[in-house]
């Protein structure tokens, strides 16, 4: 940190923390504006002036309102080569150039703040190890849950909480779409179009609707919760693209709301992390999370249950988390407190088929005597117990909707294979997990 007088400006600060900002898009410009706006407050609270001294962008000709032109550079080496710069803030995204920038920044003695969940979920192990070796920090509060202070809370406030389960609604785009479907505003395609028009969904929504964005965030949360590295490759994920309005409506009839749930569990010393649509009981706190809001629900031996909720995206919301990380670096720079991801364990993973789930199942069958007995028999053969069922008749066809008790997934899916092969079944059953 630049010690001594705070430069030419008389701000009253005891020291200046100089920042190199990589990227001036929605988040980068939000960070710059927030630092400008909160400068005096941060000095009053910490004695430190945060000062952005360089901003990396490819095109120096683009007009960037509010940003003094002399701060702009297209030369990364001028940032890492500047000994006065203490912190590099990476908000360009991606796992290629961003990796090189973060690695070089650490090697050049800088601390790093990043909002880049994919970078950390794919290549975090290398970067955290490097940070640890070099006694530098990588902070990443903005990588999960936008403005929600979930990383710091899990790493510090809950270090002794015995967390064994993390459920997350960590993707705002999909929660917006599912909320719109549940409210009858349209089917999946219509709700996606609405989300795109309002700017909640990207023009190419693949990473969000496929569950990939949520999977990266759950890898990060699981690594912190269980203190053992979980990478993107360890997380199985499914998206919401094939969900129908019928599924959402039937879920409602059974007293459930459909959500894209990230689930990280510690079971018998092994870890399982995945993302999939799930039926959430209407009285569960996660069922009340509407629109693009995010939430993380934690269960631990010591804490019972805690849920944190708030905006999961947005320029100024994400900037709030980034500025808090910069201030944390100012406060912990000399101690090197929490330099890495706290992953000092190396836990095995538990295959998803061994993890028990309750299931929702919808299947079209012929409506004649003995059909239900065949389906119940297929479940009985695999030890799957039915909790509730409704049947809707349509002429000589019937739609059966069944919710099971929690059961091992391998047995359940063997039963589904058997049911799909019955001559009385029309097509393969639709299956969704139930949060239980
Ligand atoms: N695209 C994400 C979402 C926000 O829809 O929640 C950035 O992580």
Image (cartoon, rainbow, N blue to C red):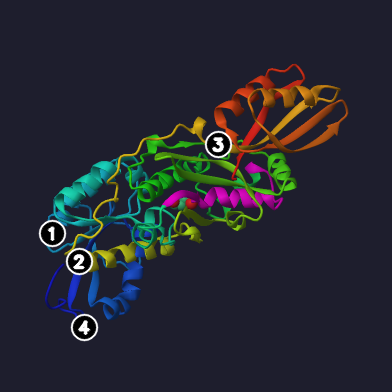
| Label at residue 82 | 1
Question: From mark 2 to mark 4, how far is it between C-alphas?
Answer: 16 Å
In the rendered view, tell whether residue 143 sits above or below residue 11: above
Mark 1 residue crowding within 10 angstroms, few (<14) / some (14–19) / many (20+): some
Instruction: Tell me, yes or no, if residue 64 can be seen here.
Output: no
Secondary structure type for disc 1: loop
Label whose residue precedes the other's in the sequence (4 or 1): 4
Label whose residue precedes the other's in the sequence (3 or 2): 2
Question: From mark 4 to mark 1, how far is it between C-alphas?
Answer: 24 Å
In the rendered view, tell whether residue 377 sits above or below residue 386: above
Give how far across and how far down residue 237 sits, in percent: 49, 37
- In the image shown, does 391 or 193 lie closer to the viewer? 391
| Label at residue 356 | 3
Label whose residue precedes the other's in the sequence (3 or 1): 1
- On screen, residue 271 versus residue 105, left or right, reads right
Q: Is mark 2 within 8 Å of ligand 1?
A: no
Give how far across and how far down residue 316 sits, in percent: 42, 64
- In the image shown, does 281 or 110 lie closer to the viewer? 281
What is the quadrant of residue 112 in the picture? Answer: bottom left
Secondary structure type for disc 3: strand
Q: Say if mark 3 contacts mark 4, CB within 8 Å.
A: no
Mark 3 residue crowding within 10 angstroms, few (<14) / some (14–19) / many (20+): some
């Amino acid at each position: 940190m630049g010690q001594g007088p705070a430069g030419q400006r008389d701000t009253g600060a005891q020291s200046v923390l100089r920042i190199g900002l990589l990227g001036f898009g929605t988040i980068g410009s939000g960070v710059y504006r927030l630092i400008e706006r909160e400068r005096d407050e941060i000095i009053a609270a910490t004695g430190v002036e945060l000062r952005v001294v360089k901003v990396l962008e490819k095109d120096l000709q683009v007009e960037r309102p509010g940003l003094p032109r002399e701060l702009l550079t297209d030369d990364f080496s001028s940032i890492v080569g500047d000994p006065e710069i203490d912190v590099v803030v990476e908000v360009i995204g991606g796992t290629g150039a961003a990796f090189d920038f973060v690695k070089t920044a650490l090697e050049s003695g800088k601390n790093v703040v990043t909002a880049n969940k994919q970078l950390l979920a794919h290549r975090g192990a290398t970067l955290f190890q490097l940070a640890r070796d070099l006694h530098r920090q990588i902070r990443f509060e903005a990588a999960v849950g936008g403005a929600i202070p979930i990383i710091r809370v899990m790493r510090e406030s809950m270090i002794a909480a015995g967390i064994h389960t993390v459920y997350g609604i960590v993707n705002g785009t999909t929660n917006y779409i599912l909320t719109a479907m549940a409210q009858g505003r349209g089917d999946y395609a219509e709700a996606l179009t609405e989300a795109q028009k309002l700017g909640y969904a990207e023009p190419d929504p693949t990473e969000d609707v496929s569950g990939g964005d949520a999977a990266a965030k759950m890898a990060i949360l699981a690594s912190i919760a269980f203190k053992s590295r979980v990478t993107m490759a360890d997380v199985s994920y499914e998206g919401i693209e094939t969900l129908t309005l019928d599924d959402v409506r039937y879920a409602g009839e059974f007293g459930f709301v459909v959500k894209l749930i990230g689930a990280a569990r510690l079971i018998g010393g092994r870890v399982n992390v995945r993302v999939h649509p799930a039926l959430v009981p209407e009285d569960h706190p996660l069922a009340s999370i509407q629109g693009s809001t995010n939430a993380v629900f934690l269960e631990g031996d010591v804490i019972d249950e805690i849920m944190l909720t708030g905006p999961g995206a947005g320029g100024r919301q994400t900037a709030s988390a980034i500025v808090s990380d910069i201030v944390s670096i100012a406060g912990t720079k000399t101690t090197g407190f929490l330099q890495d991801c706290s992953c000092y364990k190396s836990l095995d993973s538990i295959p998803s088929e061994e993890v028990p789930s309750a299931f929702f199942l919808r299947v079209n069958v012929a409506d004649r005597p003995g059909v239900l007995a065949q389906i119940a028999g297929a479940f009985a053969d695999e030890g799957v117990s039915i909790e509730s069922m409704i049947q809707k008749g349509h002429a000589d066809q019937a739609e059966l909707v069944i919710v099971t008790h929690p059961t091992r997934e391998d047995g359940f899916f063997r039963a589904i294979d058997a049911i799909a092969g019955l001559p009385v079944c029309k097509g393969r059953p639709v299956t969704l997990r139930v949060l239980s």
